[in-house]
Amino acid sequence: MCLDDPTHSRRDILKLTSLLTAAGAFPLLASLQARAASEPDAPVRIGYLPITDATPLLVAHNNGLFEAEGIKSERPVLLRSWAQVIEAFISGQVNVIHLLSPMTIWARYGSKVPAKVVAWNHVGGSGLSVAPGITDVKQLGGQTVAIPFWYSIHNVVLQQLLRENGLQSVSKPASAKLAANEVNLVVMAPSDMPPALASKRIAGYIVAEPFNALAENLKVGRIQRFTGDIWRNHACCVVFMHEHDLNNRPEWSQKVVNAIVKAQLWTRDHREEAAQLLSKDGANRYTPHTPEVLTKVLAPAASERQEYLDSGAIQHAEWNDKRIDFQPYPFPSYTEQLVTRLKDTLILGEKGFLDDLDPATTARDLVDDRFVRTAIEAVGGLQAFGFPDSFEREEEISV
């Protein structure tokens, strides 16, 4: 995606909106069924965006963890937009993806895509970056802030943060005059965000890493707040797989999830090495990012934490959470809370289906946790990931 071509991202948004309708998904689903019938033993085919959310999928491939489980995998396919990810997945070109957690709700219930969440990819790993001169959320009043998509945890968390600071989220044309308490939200591709901030087309953006670290390194922005400091250990991207694989190839599906869980465990203990292998200097060149930028996210210096505490980017020191962490279990309480909050979040486009969703029922139906439970228990339980050894939790959300 061209960094200086915002029309490109607008076309992707329109395409994604079209794909995630019943009519738009139908021909792709027909292709999916044909592929499944012609290739019942398809290897692992990963589709991903070049963000740290994809870390476990890429580590699993790089470290040969799929092969260690006895299944074949192809080189992961780098895609440039969520529209490309969705199109490749629904049509069956790829069969394992990371997807924004709210987007899985839209896909399953808005366009009836037969797929389920099987694990989380990571927790935290996102932040609100603002222009260097902004030091208070209230200063975003009358300004424009970019989000990666309407159906994203970034949009949900940002709107709560704005409300708590007396600001109202709106979506207006760029030429429209904004009230002093209004913040205009625009959808923008992550790669376009740092240039837009540098050129002052926007006052800030909220997105997955390493684009917040990139703004810091380029000195075009500062981190106002980490999203994980507002919603503790929230999921951002999750692992999404086809139901026909989960139901017809349960042993294969178990091995896929085993590899992803083991990749998360490895990453926790090899953060600097993970930053290197994900970078453009790594053997597989999975992302276009430098090792320095990725290390700032995965293995930040201890001194940086104090800087974030002093600036207010971290306000819950007692949580003692990392900039990005890895824990694969998809807690039902998170999905329930997410569905509840999406109902009250400004979302452009189709959202009528949200009215009919019961949070608890959705949490049970959207997620298939059979495989991840088995995989977690095989490596020592959730304690192996530094979390309480329980498949239940209470959501901690505090601005």
Image (tube, rainbow, N blue to C red):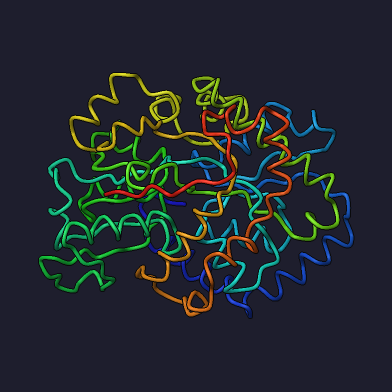
The quadrant where residue 383 appears = top right
Residue at the image point whose x is 41% and y is 50% from the top: 190
Residue 256 in the image: x percent, y percent? 74, 41
**Residue 230 in the image, given as x and y percentages of width and height:** 32, 46
Rendered view: 205 above or below 349: above
**Quadrant in the picture for residue 87:** bottom right
Residue at 59% x, 44% y is: 391
**In screen coordinates, is 169 left or right of 45?**
left
Image-based side of 67 in relation to 351, left or right: right
Question: In this rendering, would 377 be left or right of 151?
Answer: right
Please say if 5 is above or below 74. Answer: below
Q: Position of residue 293 (x, y in %)?
A: 39, 29
Residue at the spot 18% in from the left edge and 74% down from the top edge = 176
Q: How many marks?
A: 0
Is 379 in front, or is 308?
A: 379
Seen at 45% across and 59% down, the residue is 337
Q: Is residue 220 above or below residue 399?
A: above
Task: Find residue 358 and report its horizontal and vertical position in percent.
Answer: 53, 71
Q: Image check: 325 left or right of 250? A: left
Image height check: is 185 above or below 284?
below
Where, by quadrant of the figure, is residue 83 drawn?
bottom right
Looking at the image, which is closer to me, 370 or 258?
Answer: 370
